[in-house]
Image (cartoon, rainbow, N blue to C red):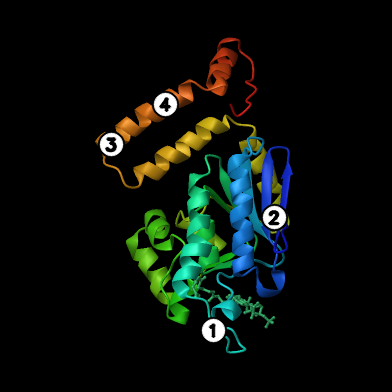
Amino acid sequence: MKYRNIKFQIKGSVATITLNRPKVLNSFHREMAAEVQNALEHCRNNSEVRAVLLTGEGRAFCAGQDLQEAVPPDGSPPPEISDLVRQNYNPIIRLIRNIEKPVVCAVNGVAAGAGANIALACDFVIASEKASFIQAFCKIGLIPDSGGTFFLPRLVGLARAAAMMMLGDKISAQQALDMGMIYKVYPPESMPDEVLKFARFLAAQPTRALGLIKKALNQSLANDLESQLEVEANLQTQAGATEDSKEAIRAFLEKRQPVFKGR
Ligand code: T3D
């Protein structure tokens, strides 16, 4: 697929997807959603990719749904809202959660609506001090989608999630960090380099195990203890059979640094 609304680059085992519609704060229309889905599928299927980095071009991360597409100014019939959610956003959230590799979101500016919730679905959310998070849906009479009602209460608790979702207030990066909603905050000048360094670090780790950890965490969100113990036993069996695990144990015994290959 030729990308016209995102930039996609694979370098040193890190795949970077950059939302690239800065004039409309990287808001999503159908074409960009299809491109993001295609790039994420590529990341899932390409064994050379061992970590994924998602970010935005310009001053915003993503302002959610492109409202010009949702309500065309020329009066032409709008797309079905259920199609937008089911065809654009849900596949992106499923891919982010089901790619068995770490996905890092670098929130370079405002993340609103579906943009905020796509960020929160990632394994690591690292924000610029200038970034903010807005559950903007209620301001336009909608409910949060893109997994927001699933992830946000689990990250910050029901009370804070309800307030963010029903008030639609802007939450600063620092507030988000303080309430455990995101992983780290950096000054805007150093954030891109810090995030890239971090993604490269992740890509050099035993990434099969990181993918299996993600699988276990996905399942833990719905399981009871008994079921989760069984999930751990199954996934540990797979992790223990990886080349990286064997290499790590050999390296420990030989008192040297392990070299991981993601196998
Ligand atoms: O049908 C459905 O909608 C279903 C799907 C729902 C999923 C959703 O994501 S719903 C939520 C949609 N998003 C929003 O409601 C956020 C709308 N945007 C804003 O509230 C503000 O733009 C921000 C708070 C994000 C940033 O404010 P500010 O003051 O920094 O920037 P701005 O001036 O408002 O925006 C800059 C430009 O981007 C501006 O265009 P212009 O005037 O320079 O030509 C603005 O119209 C455009 N823009 C920003 N957000 C969107 C957008 N254009 C289209 N869609 C947007 N979402």
What's the distance in space between the residues labelled 1 and 3, CA to CA?
47 Å
Residue position for label 1: 77
Q: Quadrant of residue 71?
A: bottom right
In front: 134, or 33?
Answer: 33
Position of the C terminus, as image quadrant, is: top right
Proximity of marks 1 and 2: CB atoms separated by less than 8 Å: no
Residues 82 and 238: in front is 82
Mark 1 touches mark 3? (CB < 8 Å): no
Spatial separation of the CA atoms under disc 2 and disc 4:
37 Å
Furthest toward the top, the residue is 254
Q: Name the residue under label 2.
A: 1
How far is disc 4 from disc 1 in space, using C-alphas?
Answer: 52 Å
Under tag 2, what secondary structure?
A: loop
Which residue type does callout 2 highlight? Met
Callout 2 environment at 10 Å: few (<14), some (14 to 19), or many (20+)? few
Residue depicted at x 56% and y 42%: 102
* Distance from the alpha carbon under mark 2 to that under mark 3: 40 Å
Distance between the alpha carbons at the discs numbered 1 and 2: 27 Å
Left or right of residue 141: residue 245: right
In the drawing, does residue 91 fall left or right of residue 231? right
Query: Where residue 96 appears, x then y in whole percent?
Result: 52, 50
* Sequence-wise first label, 1 or 2: 2
Classify the position of ligand 1 by quadrant: top left, top right, bottom left or bottom right: bottom right
Dot 3 corresponds to which residue? 227
The amino acid pointed to by label 1 is: Pro
Q: Residue 236 carries which label?
A: 4
